[in-house]
Amino acid sequence: MTNITNTKVLTFDLFGTILDLGRCLIPFIHESLDVRDIKNITADVFWEQWRYRQRIEQYQDSLLMLGHSGYLETVRRALHWTLRRYGIETTDDTVDEFMHGWQHLSPFPEVLPALERLKSQYKLVVLSNGDPDFLDYLVMQRVVWDFDNVISVTSVGAFKPHPAVYRCAAGRLGLEVDDCLMVSANSFDVMGARSCGYRGAYINRYNLPYEDTHFQPDVTVNDFTELADALL
């Protein structure tokens, strides 16, 4: 058992932490590449490039401060870049076809049993870069879990790890920042939360190194089962 003092609420990242993006999206990507007879890129590598570019789109969106575009818009922009990167025509039909998989995301298999365990001790809240309507759909129709709250960064107008996201979420919940623990498989998310005074749990699903920073996670585990074991 890990002693996380004062923690009253667990705030969860959704994309890549609760929802298994790669497993859900790669089959759609493979089908779209195959139907176009694209041979110069595999679905796995295409997804890796798409996801990487989306991070850049989100950082640019926050830094330029020209108005918050929204999560799915940064996904679409990143898709345009990735399609052009591999010489694939960016018609509306092509873009819509590649984007279709985002409506079919599902959680990692161990998530729901772990949430069932964790709810006995903590409030469970989604704190996501996703757009509000999209989050509502995903939580109700794809995760199918009754969280205590679902908070979108749209209310702040910047993507995580902008500090306003974490501070505003704590305020919205009526809590101090050190009452909250951010759970994410994205290390930049844990780092951002820790820098604002949150506790942090890094779900290292992808066996990736953590940021070179003194804002280290309080807990590092491989999945939600291990998270529940550590926090209860």
Image (cartoon, rainbow, N blue to C red):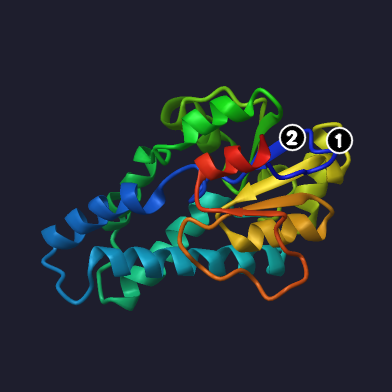
Residue that appears at 79% across and 33% down? 8
Camera-nearest residue between 192 and 211 = 211
Side (left or right) of 68 relative to 224 = right
Question: Is disc 1 in contact with disc 2, using a CB cutoff of under 8 Å?
Answer: yes
Regarding mark 2 in the picture, which secondary structure is present there?
strand
**Label 2 is placed on what type of residue?**
Val
Residue that appears at 69% across and 38% down? 10
Q: Is residue 123 above or below residue 224?
A: above
Asked whether residue 75 appears in the rendered view, the answer is: yes
Q: Provide the residue designation for mark 1.
A: 175
> 10 Å neighbourhood of mark 1: few (<14), some, or many (≥20)?
some
Q: Is residue 125 above or below residue 13?
A: above
> 10 Å neighbourhood of mark 2: few (<14), some, or many (≥20)?
many
Regarding mark 1 in the picture, which secondary structure is present there?
loop
Side (left or right) of 178 relative to 91 = right
Residue 71 image position (x, y, % from top left): 54, 51
Asked whether residue 67 appears in the rendered view, the answer is: no
Residue 12 image position (x, y, % from top left): 62, 42
Residue 64 image position (x, y, % from top left): 69, 69
Residue that appears at 21% across and 58% down? 30
Q: Provide the residue designation for mark 2.
A: 9
**Label 1 is placed on what type of residue?**
Leu
Quarter holding the C terminus is top right
Residue 144 - label: none
Q: Nearer the viewer, mark 1 or mark 2?
A: 2
Between the C-alphas of marks 1 and 2, the distance is 9 Å
- Dividing the picture into quadrants, the one containing residue 46 is bottom left
**Residue pushed farthest front?**
1
Q: How many marks?
A: 2
